[in-house]
Image: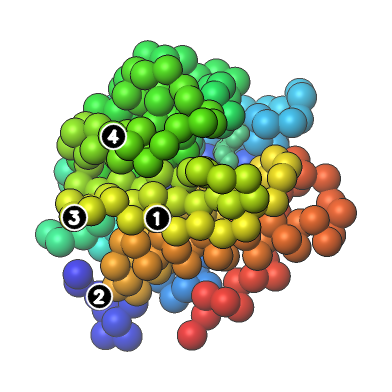
Amino acid sequence: MLANRLNQKRVLTIQDVSCVGRCSLTVALPILSAAGLETSILPTAILSTHTGGFTGYTYRDLTSDIAPIAEHWESLGLKFDALYTGYLGSFEQLELVSSLFDRFKLDGGIILIDPVMGDNGALYTGFTPEFAASMARLCAKSDVVVPNLTEAAFMLNEPYIGEGYDSGYIEGVLTRLRGLGANSAVLTGVSFEPGKIGVATLDGGAVEYYFTERVDGYFHGTGDVYASVLLAYLGRGLRLHEAAAKAADFTLECIKLQLMSGGEPRYGVPFELCLGLLTR
Ligand code: PXL
C-alpha cells in the first residue's frame, strides 16, 4: 500500500456524525488516529445523538454534499489505502459509496464494510430488509465485511438464529458472506457456550475462531469500536484473524471499563481510556 515518507497509511472513513453518544465517526476517527493512520472523514449525516436509546434527535442528511466533495478530491488526485464505511442511511448513499470505492481506492488498498443495520435479531430504526439487500450488493466490492449475526442474516435473506447454532451454521454464514463477493468476512457476536463470546473469520482458508469472556448487557457503539480497531490493526499489516482477535480484546477492555464507570450505556463505552493500547 502507498504511504507517505513516515510510512503512514491514509484511510477514509464514511459514516455519520452522531454528535453525542460515542459511535460512528466520534469513535472511528480517534481510534484510527491513535493507531497512527492518517484519517480523512466523509460525514454522511449529522445527528444530535445516535438513534439507539434517545428520542427527539435531529438528523441533517448530507447526501447531497458527497458528490461535490468527491469531485474536489478527484481534482486533487487523492487516493486512499483504505476506505471504511459504517452506518449509512439511504439507498442513495449506498450508490454514492459504491462509486467512491471505484474512484478512491489505491491498488492493493482495503475496502472494509461494517454493514451497521441492527442487532439482536432486529434492524435499527429506519432500516428495512430491502436496504439490507442493497448493502449485501455493496459488499461485493469489499475486501472485509464485518457483520454481526443479525446483519449477516438480513444481508443473506435468512432467518436470524440467535443461539443454539453450531460451527457448521457459522461456517455456512461466513461462506455465504464471501459468496456475496466479499474477499473475507469477520462475523461478530459468535457464541457456542455460556460465558464466552467471540468472532469467526474467513479469508479463503479455514474458518478461525477467537473467544473472550462474555459480559452480559447491551453496550452501545461497541460494533463501531470493534470495526475501527480491526481496521487499525489491518492497517498495521496484521493478518485478518490476528487483527480480529486484537479488536475483540480491545472491545472487551472498553466494556469492562464501561461497567466500572457506571455510565449510561446509551452514551457508549469509555474507549478513550484504552487508546493507549493502540499507540506505538
Ligand atoms: O453504532 C451504530 C450507529 C451509528 N450511527 C447511528 C446510529 C447507530 C446505532 O444505533 O443510530 C446514527
Q: Viewer-proximal residue, 149 or 139?
A: 149
Comparing marks 1 and 2, which lies closer to the viewer?
1
Q: Which residue is mark 1?
A: 209
- Disc assigned to residue 172: 4
- Secondary structure of the residue carrying tag 1 is strand
The picture places residue 119, in percent across and down from the top left corner, at: 56, 31
Please identify the quadrant where the N terminus is shown: bottom left
Which residue type carries mark 4? Answer: Gly
Depicted 202 relative to depicted 65: above or below: below
Comparing marks 2 and 3, which lies closer to the viewer?
3
- Secondary structure of the residue carrying tag 4 is helix
- Secondary structure of the residue carrying tag 3 is loop
Which residue type carries mark 3? Answer: Gly
Tally of numbered tags: 4
What is the crowding at mark 3: few (fewer than 14 residues within 10 Å), some, or many (at least 20)?
Answer: few
Q: CA distance from mark 2 to mark 3?
A: 29 Å
User: Which is nearer the N-term, disc 2 or disc 3?
Assistant: 2
Q: Viewer-proximal residue, 213 or 36?
A: 213
Q: CA distance from mark 1 to mark 3?
A: 13 Å
What is the crowding at mark 1: few (fewer than 14 residues within 10 Å), some, or many (at least 20)?
Answer: some
User: Which is nearer the N-term, disc 4 or disc 2?
Assistant: 2
Depicted 213 relative to depicted 184: above or below: below
- Disc assigned to residue 205: 3
Look at 31% across and 46% down and name the residue there.
185
Which residue type carries mark 2? Answer: Ala
- Secondary structure of the residue carrying tag 2 is loop
| Residue 191 visible here | yes
The picture places residue 127, in percent across and down from the top left corner, at: 50, 19
Query: Would you identify the image quadrant in which residue 12 lies?
Result: bottom left
Ligand 1 occupies quarter: top right
Comparing marks 4 and 2, which lies closer to the viewer?
4
